[in-house]
Each structure stands twice: as C-alpha cells, then as structure tokens.
C-alpha cells in the first residue's frame, strides 16, 4: 500500500520520509462560511456585539475567528481559552505572583512597576486588544467551560473597553473606534446566563451538507477528481447518518479532510468504495487503517471495522 507500512518495515528504517503537514487544513483564506454564518457575522459587526457560535466540534467555530481576522487584514486573533478555573482578570492578563515573590527575595531594591510588568505580567485576549488599542479579532474559546459568572464579566468588559492592573497601578482604556471584534465559541456543555445571551448575536453552525463538504474538501485536499471526492463523501455521510453503523461520536469536517488526504496518500481508488464487497485485500486493509481517523473511541472503531467485514 502506497504511503503505509513505514513502521515495522525493516527495509524502510533508514528512509523515513519528512513529515509534510497539510498547510491548507487551517488556511483562513480557504474557510467556506455558509450564507447564514456570513449574515450572523455582519449583524454582529453592525451592532458591535459579540458573536456567540455553537455547533458540534469540527464545524469551524474556532477557525471563523482566523478567517474574519484574515479577511479584514487584522493579523491573527487574540485568544483566550476559557477554563473551569478562569476568573474575570484572566480575560485581560496573567500575573505570575509566585515568580515575582521568588525573584524579590534575591533583590535588595524593589522592582519598578515597569520592570514588574515586563517580567511577570502577560497580556492576552481582551487585555492585549485594549492595551494595544488597535482593531483586532478576539477569540474567547469554549466559554461554556468557564464559571457561570464569567460570561457576564466578559460583556461588562466589552462594553466598558477598560481594565486595570493593580499590581503595577496601570489603567488601560480603549477607543470606541478600535472596539475589538469578539467571537465566542461554546460546545453547549452547560447553559449560559440569560442576561449574557440577550446581549450577544447567536448562531449555530450546522454540519455542512454534501455540496458544501465537497467544496471544502476539494479546496483543502488535492489529487482526487470531483467524482471521486463525491464517492468518499457519500461513504463518510453514510457512516455519520448511522445507516450501517451507529457512531457514538460522529466524525466532523476536520476528520473527513484528514481521512481523504490519507486515502489519497495511500493510493486508494475511491471507485472501489462503491461496493465494499468487491474490495481487494489490499484496499480493505487500507480502509481498515484509515478508519482510525474517523473513529475516536474503541466501540466506534470496532463497529466500523465490523461494517467493512460484513
């Protein structure tokens, strides 16, 4: 099988090829937003409100922030990844109090506020956007993981465009004309406060239909023809739809792209997938290997392999 059998093949121990990552996978220029998503972005921009995105993992929630920043030539998004321990201050900066304390034990003279800022304070997310006072896209990722009060703190911070760093006695206001574009994502792991939801623009990204999937995959994986890609996408959608196997965790767009790229690298002919009963031993082995990209737990992988054998 082309591209496979590198590991445990003694003949290839000294000829391990360089790893070539698919640089198109996360290329913001290749992002394909739906009409509904484009409308939601425009509404958020006109109102100056944050855009809250939901949708199953792998539908492009996080990548939208990179696409919007690229579209408006605003550089890369400034990112805040919410955690279960996140506090309101974390939206703006992090202060390493322990490192500061340890450093101070060895110094005769106290550090100036400027030295403390340089050594022990790191600005990110909203703080970096407000501090630099330039137009930027801020991505607040997976805010449903944060404590329940944090979403309301986010909105207060966005409306005020102001924060303080008491450790160095500094205040940072931002100009209204440089109000950051805020994109927030949620995996709907828990309900968000009603007061928060009333003050954001909301959009749920549905899983792409077959035509959109074809457009996405064709732009990010080269080599296969449109007809061949349609065959692979149809097989992928059959798995997702539960017609032949009931997946506990459905594969998403990112898995589809990687799966197609792997099959192409392995030299797999998509026409052979139309009737799995006619697959050669080699093709069947290729598919068996490739399904580890689509399945993300033991039971799903077991069921897909059972489907292939039957």
Image: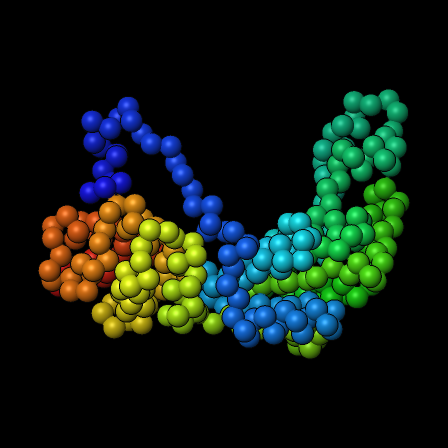
Looking at the rendered structure, the number of numbered marks drawn on it comes to 0
Give me the residue at 11% from left, 50% from top.
281
Q: Is residue 249 left or right of residue 206?
A: left
Residue 12, image x, y percentages: 24, 28
Q: 244 and 219: which one is in front?
A: 219
Task: State which quadrant residue 150 falls in.
Answer: bottom right
Displayed quadrant of residue 53: bottom right
Q: Position of residue 187 (x, y in %)?
A: 52, 65
Q: Is residue 69 visible?
A: yes
- Asked whether, in this view, residue 95 is left or right of residue 245, the answer is right
Vertically, is 62 above or below 107? Answer: below
Closer-to-camera residue (304/18): 18
Instruction: Please give the name of the residue rendered at 33% of the width and 32% of the height, measured from the top-left corner.
Output: 17
Quadrant in the rendering for residue 190: bottom right
Q: Give the side of residue 4 with respect to residue 110, left or right.
A: left
100 displayed left or right of 58: right
**Which colour scheme appears in the figure?**
rainbow
At x 87%, y 50%, the residue is 171
Query: Residue at 59% of width from left, 55% of height from top?
Result: 66
Residue 308 position in % (x across, y down): 18, 60
Quadrant where the image shows the N terminus: top left
Q: Is residue 254 visible?
A: no
What is the x, y in percent for residue 34?
52, 70
Q: Quadrant of the C terminus?
A: bottom left
């Amino acid at each position: 099988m082309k591209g496979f059998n590198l590991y445990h093949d003694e003949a290839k121990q000294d000829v391990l090829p360089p790893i070539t990552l698919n640089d198109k996978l996360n290329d913001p220029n290749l992002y394909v937003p739906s009409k509904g998503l484009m409308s939601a972005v425009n509404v958020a921009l006109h109102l100056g409100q944050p855009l809250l995105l939901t949708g199953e993992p792998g539908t492009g929630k996080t990548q939208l922030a990179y696409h919007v920043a690229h579209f408006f030539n605003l550089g890369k998004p400034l990112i805040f990844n919410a955690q279960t321990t996140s506090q309101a201050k974390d939206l703006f900066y992090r202060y390493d109090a322990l490192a500061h304390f340890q450093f101070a034990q060895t110094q005769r003279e106290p550090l100036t506020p400027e030295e403390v800022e340089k050594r022990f304070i790191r600005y990110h997310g909203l703080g970096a956007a407000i501090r630099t006072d330039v137009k930027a896209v801020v991505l607040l990722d997976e805010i449903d993981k944060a404590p329940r009060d944090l979403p309301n703190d986010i909105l207060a911070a966005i409306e005020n465009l102001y924060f303080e760093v008491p450790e160095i006695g500094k205040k940072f206001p931002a100009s209204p004309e440089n109000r950051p574009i805020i994109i927030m994502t949620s995996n709907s792991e828990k309900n968000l406060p009603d007061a928060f939801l009333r003050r954001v623009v909301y959009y749920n990204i549905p899983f792409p239909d077959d035509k959109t999937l074809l457009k996405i995959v064709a732009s990010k994986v080269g080599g296969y023809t449109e007809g061949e890609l349609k065959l692979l996408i149809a097989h992928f959608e059959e798995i997702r739809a539960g017609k032949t196997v009931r997946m506990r965790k459905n594969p998403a767009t990112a898995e589809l792209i990687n799966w197609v790229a792997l099959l192409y690298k392995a030299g797999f002919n998509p026409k052979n997938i139309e009737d799995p009963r006619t697959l050669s031993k080699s093709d069947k082995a290729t598919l068996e290997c490739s399904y580890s990209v689509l399945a993300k737990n033991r039971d799903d992988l077991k069921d897909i392999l059972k489907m292939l054998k039957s």
